[in-house]
Amino acid sequence: MDDKKLVKDFMVEIELPRDWDKDFMELIPRQRDELEDMLTNGTIDFYSLSLDRSKLWMLMNGESKDVVMDIISDMAMSQFFKVDIHSLMFTRSQNQITATFSLN
């Protein structure tokens, strides 16, 4: 049997505070850097912030909800987050569609 761990997709919904105080605002650059690093290393496939800045969504890759929650708990702004993690059956995106080339 293969020792590789099964990586699953999780949709993470994070509720952000309505009122952003100084402590919260000071963490934004560090949090943005963490998210960019997670994009680069494949921990997340995307993240989106709602227009009113009250919600953040991320498609995360992990072995389990507990592992995903551990990653989120280590994030700079985690003490301000209300987190809901959803296990996904599958994910399909435009980025997964490959172009068909014709040699004619």
Image (cartoon, rainbow, N blue to C red):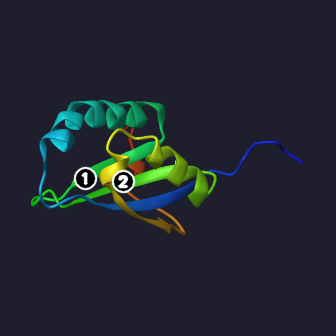
Q: How many C-alpha atoms fall within 10 Å of the one at disc 1: few (<14), some, or many (≥20)?
A: few
Point 24% across, 36% down: residue: 27
> Dot 2 corresponds to which residue?
58
Amino acid type indicated by mark 2: Met
Side (left or right) of 4 relative to 76: right
Residue 99 position in % (x across, y down): 37, 45
Quadrant assignment, res 18 = bottom left
Total marks drawn? 2
| Quadrant location, the C terminus | top left
> Dot 1 corresponds to which residue?
48
Point 14% across, 56% down: residue: 53
Amino acid type indicated by mark 1: Ser
Q: How many C-alpha atoms fall within 10 Å of the one at disc 2: few (<14), some, or many (≥20)?
A: some
**SS for dot 2:** strand
Residue 102 position in % (x across, y down): 38, 41
Between 57 and 89, the residue placed more toward the observer is: 57
Image height check: is 5 above or below 91? above
Q: Earlier in the sequence, mark 1 or mark 2?
A: 1
Residue 42 position in % (x across, y down): 47, 38
Side (left or right) of 8 relative to 22: right
